[in-house]
Image (cartoon, grey):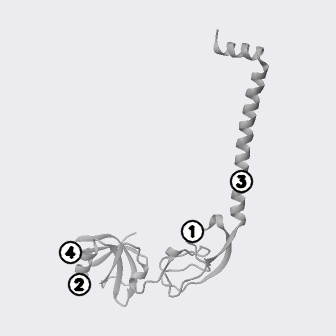
Amino acid sequence: MHVVARARHFLARHPWAYWAVVLSFAAIVAGAIFHQLSLLEDARQEWQETRSVLVADTDLQPGDSIRASSTDLPLAVLPESALDVVPNGSRLRQRVAAGEVLVAADLTQIPGPAARAEPGTVVVGLTDPQSRGVVVGLSVQVAADGLVLSAEATVVETIDDVVFVAVAGHEAPAVAAAAHSGIATLLYLP
């Protein structure tokens, strides 16, 4: 006898088994619905709880004075490192768009050109007569004698005719030697 036929024969002789299966499925569906409703309530609670954080008033560039106002936002949308006050002596390390929440990574308290460098990089100052109009945050390469010494560098400061670039730690000695010799040049990336 086929399995389906046996099952139908069993259920015909024992109607309680049919209702036990129906009630089991109903209990499973009710449990799943209850679980989803509790998840929905948890999410609703996260959106109701707020915290006061700093939000940029305008687009800010590295080195700009920090113009931000305090705003209450739901905890569900806030990063862990959102700031509620600007620490004394802090400077802006990177670009921040208007309406963006300020986080700890946006600010630095390190003085000088290294303030805008990413952790793990080294800042080297070089003079390149062709580098007029270079802006902070520009991605460049550093070359000397036809060789690329740093394939990924970022301009972090310009003071008079000196351009400070952040390069990877292992590339810094070669870039510094080329800068000292006066043969380092910047290659601009599109």
- Kind of residue at disc 1: Glu
Q: Position of residue 30 (x, y in %)?
A: 75, 40
Residue where numbered disc 2 is placed? 180
Q: Position of residue 75 (x, y in %)?
A: 65, 67
Residue where numbered disc 3 is placed? 40
The residue depicted at 69 percent of the width and 52 percent of the height is 39
Residue where numbered disc 4 is placed? 145
The residue depicted at 49 percent of the width and 74 percent of the height is 105
Name which of mark 3 and mark 1 comes first in the sequence: 3
Under circle 3, the secondary element is helix
Name which of mark 2 and mark 4 comes first in the sequence: 4
Residue where numbered disc 1 is placed? 80
Under circle 1, the secondary element is loop
- Kind of residue at disc 3: Leu
Q: Residue furthest top?
A: 1
- Kind of residue at disc 4: Asp
Mark 4 or 3: in front is: 3
CA gap between label 4 and label 3 equals 63 Å
